[in-house]
Each structure stands twice: as C-alpha cells, then as structure tokens.
Amino acid sequence: MSHITTHILDAATGRPAAGVPVALVDTAGIEIAAGVTDDNGRIAGLGPEQLDSGAYRLTFATGEYFQRTGTETFYPVVSIEFSVTDSEQHYHVPLLISPFAYSTYRGS
C-alpha cells in the first residue's frame, strides 16, 4: 500500500471530484509522485510504500476540475503541506472543495 493516499469531495455537488491531477513533492520541490483522482475522487497509490520523516506537499490542480465542470473558482490550485513524523504510519490526506472554499484534515 502507498504511504500517502488522498481523496477529493466536491462539497458543492456532494460528489467525488474525478480527474483532478495531484502531485506529491518534497521540501526541495522535487516531485516524488503524481496521479489523477479516479471516478470516486480517490488516489489509492500516490507515492512510494514508505517516505522518510519530514515535510511534504500535495498540490491539487482544482482549477482544471472546475473548468471542466464549467464552474468559476477562486482557488485554481490547492497546496497542502504536511509532516510525516512516523515513517511506519499510513497518511491519508482528504480534501473537500467548493468553488470558493476548501478544507482538509488528517484522515485514516
């Protein structure tokens, strides 16, 4: 299983956000992995099976998603910085989006 997983829910429609490009990068800005959300808004295997402890960033190309749906958005990109403190744990980083707001939390 991938060390990092994510999913995106479009809170304005109550549906998963499919087809959103997502990149995982380290603090130096080096891309470690990339993927696109599936029909359920999920990326089950983003990145390697294990990451070293440290800071990372997930970047979601939400503008592409909203453009495809014909929806104006204020946030064309959402970047979430987070810390891996235990290289043995799984990290799930969900994202809730709407055209003019977003939120996130540490999932399980």
Image: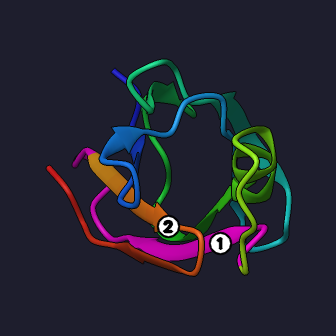
Q: Is mark 2 on a helix, strand or loop?
A: strand
Residue type beneath disc 2: Ser
Please report the residue visible at 78 percent of the width from the left and 38 percent of the height from the top.
68
The residue that mark 1 highlights is 79
Residue bounds of the magenta highlight: 75-90
Disc nearest the viewer among 1 and 2: 2
Q: Is residue 39 visible?
A: yes
Q: Is mark 1 on a helix, strand or loop?
A: strand
Q: Rounded to the nearest whole Å, what is the CA distance between mark 1 and mark 2? A: 15 Å
Q: Where is residue 6 in the image (x, y as percent from the top left)?
A: 41, 44
Residue 9 counted in the magenta span = no
Q: How crowded is mark 1: few (under 14 residues within 10 Å), some or many (20 or more)?
A: some
* Vertical arrangement, residue 27 with respect to residue 12, above or below: below
Residue 76 counted in the magenta span = yes
Q: Where is residue 102 in the image (x, y as percent from the top left)?
A: 47, 76
Q: Which mark is residue 17?
A: none
Q: Position of residue 39 (x, y in %)?
A: 47, 18
Q: In this view, does 28 lie to the left or right of 21?
A: right
The residue that mark 2 highlights is 98
Q: Position of residue 29 (x, y in %)?
A: 85, 66
Please report the residue visible at 51 percent of the width from the left and 71 percent of the height from the top.
54
Count numbered badges in the picture.
Answer: 2
Residue type beneath disc 1: Ser
Quadrant (top left, top right, bottom left, bottom right) of the N terminus: top left
